[in-house]
Amino acid sequence: MKLLNTKKRKRKKKMKASTVAVLCALVAMLGLYMISFNYVQAKKVVAYDYMSREFYGDQEVVEIKKEKKEKKEEVIEIEEDYDDSYIGYLTIPKINLTKGFVDKRSKENNVEKNIIVVEGSDYPNVKKGNLILAGHSGTGWKAFFNDLQQLSKGDIMYVNYKNKTYEYKLVNIYTQAKVGKLSIYRNYDKTTLTLITCTNNDSRTQTVYISELQKVKKK
């Protein structure tokens, strides 16, 4: 009986050891998969940037500024007062989005409050210019650009500005790593609209949507 019990204990030890070995192997494989996946994704972003530079040549570089946290000490700024009301509206029928934007010099031109007109943007009435709008994605009331992920090339969007409607067609979508600056690849012979937001489910990159002007209608 003692011999049988000893054999049983040995079998159990062997089974436990083999189970641990299998679990360790699975964890190691999962770790290798995650490392390789992140490596491949990073290489895709680099490869796209390279191909875009080769295809488009020169590109605009815009700085994406993070909102500064409020300091404890009182800071008084003297600025020219700009009207905080909306000067234009972005409409994307496919995702049922209509959202206004303010003058880029307004204090309300803040990603925590609105979609923003990025510094260096042109307004829609500038020939061969580029209107650049940025907004949050994710969750919450200020995630105005969360549904941009549903868009695809060929989709139509509109900007209403100074009693005219500017119709754009989406021609390019790409991602870039978050490094504080972003390259915009577009056709400089076209009047364009660029939308920028964080990539859904990927905190390391942001997605850029490039649209080209198709026609202008007066109200």
Image (cartoon, rainbow, N blue to C red):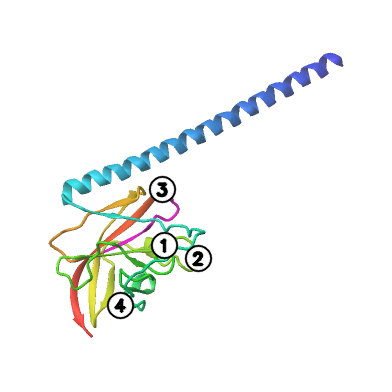
Q: x and y percent of residue 75 in the render?
A: 44, 63
Query: Rounded to the nearest whole Å, what is the CA distance between mark 3 and mark 2?
Result: 20 Å
In this view, the residue farthest toward the bottom is 219
Q: CA distance from mark 1 to mark 3?
A: 14 Å
Q: Gap in Å between the C-alphas at discs 3 and 4?
A: 32 Å
Instruction: Name the residue at 33% across, 73% down.
Output: 102
Mark 2 near mark 1, Cβ–Cβ under 8 Å? Answer: yes
Mark 1 or mark 3: whose residue is earlier in sequence: 1
Judging by the rendered image, the residue that carries numbered circle 4 is: 87
Please name which of the two marks, 3 or 4, marks the residue nearer to the observer: 4
Q: Could you tell me the amino acid type at mark 1?
A: His
Relative horizontal placement of residue 10, taking residue 146 as reference (left or right):
right
Where residue 179 sits: x, y (%)? Answer: 35, 47
State the residue position of label 3: 204
At label 3, which amino acid type do we have? Arg
What SS does tag 2 mark?
loop
Residue position marked by numbered label 1 in the rendering: 136
Coordinates of residue 87 in the picture (x, y in percent) = 30, 77
Give SS at disc 3.
loop
C-alpha distance separating marks 2 and 1: 9 Å
Extent of the magenta region: 194-204
Considering only vertical position in the picture, is 14 above or below 73? above
Q: Quadrant of residue 108?
A: bottom left
- The reply to whether callout 3 and callout 4 are in contact (CB within 8 Å) is no
